[in-house]
Amino acid sequence: MERSELLKSFIEGWKDVPVVWGESDCTAYAAKWVEIATGCPMARLADYSSKDEALEIIAQHGGLLALWSNALAQAGIFENRGDPQLGDVALVRTADYGDIGVIIANDGACILRTETGTRFLRPRSFVKVWAI
């Protein structure tokens, strides 16, 4: 299956999934995509079941960037230093949520999960992009 078809199927499969911290939030969503796209299981980033627990774990690791970088490196996935490609994962900085994990879609759009569900956004820049 082509990457675009795989990503479309992944997005559609999550359309009606409620956001649950530690299971289907922005980080868990991107990690599940990485597993599907690569066939490589992701190291569990951490066990958490609330926003407060997630924020505490992020702080303990020195930020979301450090947490993601470490987990993705353990899976053999490293920074994409070129233009983001369809299906890559990234961190973007938002006014509403701070740093948030996303999956790169077409034409510079990103797919993310927030407490209101799956959304699309066009970031001005990326904190970091990892090649999938």
Image (cartoon, rainbow, N blue to C red):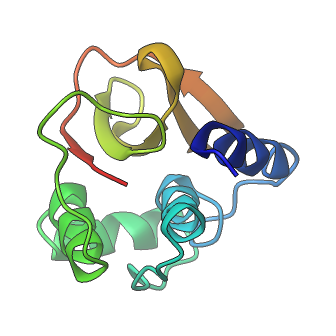
Report x, y in % for residue 62: 11, 67
Find residue 53 and report its image quarter. Answer: bottom left
Left or right position of 66 against 30:
left
At 65% from the left and 62% from the top, the residue drawn is 24
At 44% from the left and 42% from the top, the residue drawn is 102
Is residue 40 depicted above or below 52 in this figure? Answer: below
Does residue 93 show up?
A: yes
Is residue 123 depicted above or below 16 in this figure? Answer: above
Left or right position of 126 against 103:
left
At 54% from the left and 75% from the top, the residue drawn is 39
Is residue 6 depicted above or below 126 in this figure? Answer: below
Number of numbered labels in the structure image: 0
Left or right position of 70 against 57:
left
Left or right position of 74 against 44:
left
Find residue 56 and report its image quarter. Answer: bottom left
At 47% from the left and 14% from the top, the residue drawn is 107
In the image, 74 versus 48, the foreground residue is: 74
Report x, y in % for residue 8: 72, 39
Residue farthest along the right direction in this orientation: 16
Residue farthest along the front direction in this orientation: 1
In the image, 30 versus 84, the foreground residue is: 84
Does residue 116 show up?
A: no
The quarter of the picture where the C terminus appears is bottom left
Report x, y in % for residue 115: 64, 44
Report x, y in % for residue 128: 19, 42
Find residue 99 and report its image quarter. Answer: top left
